[in-house]
Image (cartoon, helix red, strand yellow):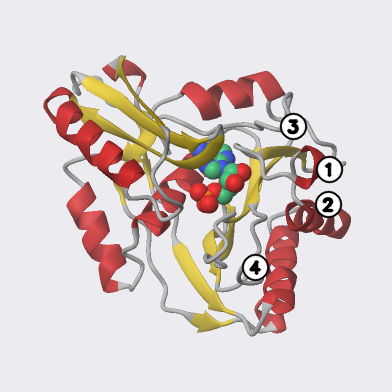
Amino acid sequence: MIISCPMMTSLYSVRMRASSHDQHLSGAERIVPVHAVAETTAALIERALSAPLGPPDKIHCNSEQIDPVTVQFAKLPDVHSYQVANVQEGRLAATQFLIEAGLSADCAALAVATLAEGAGPGGIVMRGAVLMDAVTGERLEHDPARGVRVSRMDILSTFRPDVEALLVAAGLGHHRVIEALVLSGKVLQAPGVVAELCWSDAPDYVTGYVAAPQCGYQRISQLKAAGDKRGGRVFFVDRSKVTVSALVDYLERQPVLFDAAGTIAPLKKWELEDA
Ligand code: AMP
């Protein structure tokens, strides 16, 4: 459940985007109180400069005040982690999780194939996510290269140390995991979203996930081969519950802060019968 909190004041959305020769290198964003804007901006710029793909030639950092009455508060999804033997098994697990979330087998397979082949025009990696009709598999995003960019979400700053400690204790303390969990948490709060599929475009990061409102955030240890530069996200939408424009507006503009954690289950070997 999401509850607006009218008491919070002076919040800013701080967003960083780094590129080199117009190729996206890294990005991150936070929602912080006004007194933390300068320090957060410095930390995000520092992160952009130390990105593994080399120093960017452009770093955009932008801070924007958020009206505190518009902020919605929510709980992070429960986290499950599954060990798979190889990419094939990982994609089978992802397909099964998507079917459990309510998608048809055809739609689930289409989404996996879309990310595997490169979801953008000509097989390029998109900057944002594919929006897919959960019934027909139709692509709904207006710009197939950009897709839909989820923005304006974070962990409540006073609660962040608790969440980080929980994730570190579970061996999930890398900022990549926390950020993906926060992004997915917002996606699962959005009206009409049935599920999300994700694996990274970073060649060395092969873990991905399927998330769904009733199943939580299900990490899968391998969803692509090491060295593969293709990756992306697919958000599945039930168009009987929301219009595309209302969903995109929510994903891009609605500020969401997480002030409670879900459960974190220990790593488990995935078996077909789990599905
Ligand atoms: P990452 O997990 O950061 O490697 O991102 C994997 C893919 O997810 C990217 O290639 C984009 O297609 C997509 N993506 C990254 N950030 C966002 C975002 N904020 N909103 C929607 N999609 C995103």
Of circles 3 and 1, the one toward us is 3
Mark sitting earlier along the chain (3/2) = 2
Give the quadrant of residue 37: top left
Secondary structure at numbered mark 4: loop
Q: Looking at the image, is 65 positioned above or below residue 259?
A: above
Q: Is mark 4 within 8 Å of ligand 1?
A: no
Mark on residue 223?
Answer: 4
Give the amino acid type for the residue marked by disc 3 in the picture: Pro
Lower sequence index among marks 4 and 1: 1
Percent x, y for residue 169?
26, 72
Q: Which tag is nearer the camera, tag 2 or tag 1?
A: 2
Ligand 1 quarter of the rendering: top right
Cα distance in 3D space between marks 2 and 1: 7 Å
Q: Which residue is mark 1?
A: 135
What amino acid type should be assigned to the residue bearing mark 1? Val
Q: Mark 1: few, some, or many residues within 10 Å (few <14, many ≥20)?
A: some
User: What kind of element bears circle 2?
Assistant: helix
Percent from the top left, x then y, of residue 214?
57, 54
Left or right, 21 with reference to 165: right
Which mark lies nearer to you, 4 or 1?
Answer: 4
Q: Which residue is mark 2?
A: 107
In x, y percent, where is residue 231? 64, 54
From the Cβ of disc 3, is ligand 1 less than 8 Å away? no
Relative to residue 271, is residue 200 drawn left or right? left
Instruction: In the rendered structure, find residue 144 and report the number of the disc placed on it.
Output: 3
Query: Would residue 167 be seen by someone viewing this image from the given angle?
Result: yes
Residue closer to the observer: 22 or 37: 22
Mark pair 4, 2: CA separation: 17 Å
Disc 2 marks a residue whose amino acid type is Cys
Residue 109 shows which numbered tag?
Answer: none
